[in-house]
Amino acid sequence: MSDDKTLPLARRRLFAGAGAVGAVAAVAAVAPRLMPAEPAKVADAQAAADPSGGYQETEHVLRYYQTARV
């Protein structure tokens, strides 16, 4: 009788494992498309857009500092 009780549990584990493997395979198939081709080019483009390359005190930042004062 103990074999009857372990059989459904083993079957459930098999199907759960198969589902998990399928989900991992799907993520692995889609992941390369989500990553940028060359991250260095993205960083270079952002640096070219901001020639100072550093912190800038804009009106928005100054307004935040005023509201954050205690």
Image (cartoon, rainbow, N blue to C red):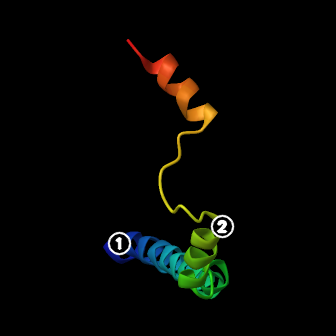
Task: Give coordinates of residue 51: x percent, y percent.
Answer: 58, 65
Q: CA distance from mark 2 to mark 1?
A: 73 Å
Asked whether 17 or 6 is in front, the reply is: 17
The mark tally for this picture is 2
Q: Position of residue 34 (x, y in %)?
A: 65, 78
| Residue plotted at (62% across, 88% down) | 37
The amino acid at mark 2 is Ala
Q: Is residue 7 left or right of residue 58?
A: left
Crowd tier of the residue under label 1, counting other residues whose Cα lies within 10 Å: few below 14, some 14–19, many 20 or above: few
Query: In the rendering, at what x and y percent does residue 67 appear?
Result: 51, 17
Q: Label for residue 16? A: none
- Image quadrant holding the N terminus, namely bottom left
- The amino acid beneath tag 1 is Met
Q: Residue at x 53, y 40 (%)?
A: 57
Q: First in sequence: mark 2 or mark 1? A: 1
Q: Residue at x 55, y 34 (%)?
A: 61
Q: Residue drawn at (52%, 82%), measured in percent from left and top?
A: 21
What residue is shown with label 2? 49
Q: Is residue 27 left or right of residue 12?
A: right
Q: Position of residue 56 (x, y in %)?
A: 53, 47
In the image, is residue 26 above or below residue 5?
below
Q: Around disc 2, counting alpha carbons within 10 Å, would you say few (fewer than 14), some (14 to 19), or many (20 or more)?
A: few
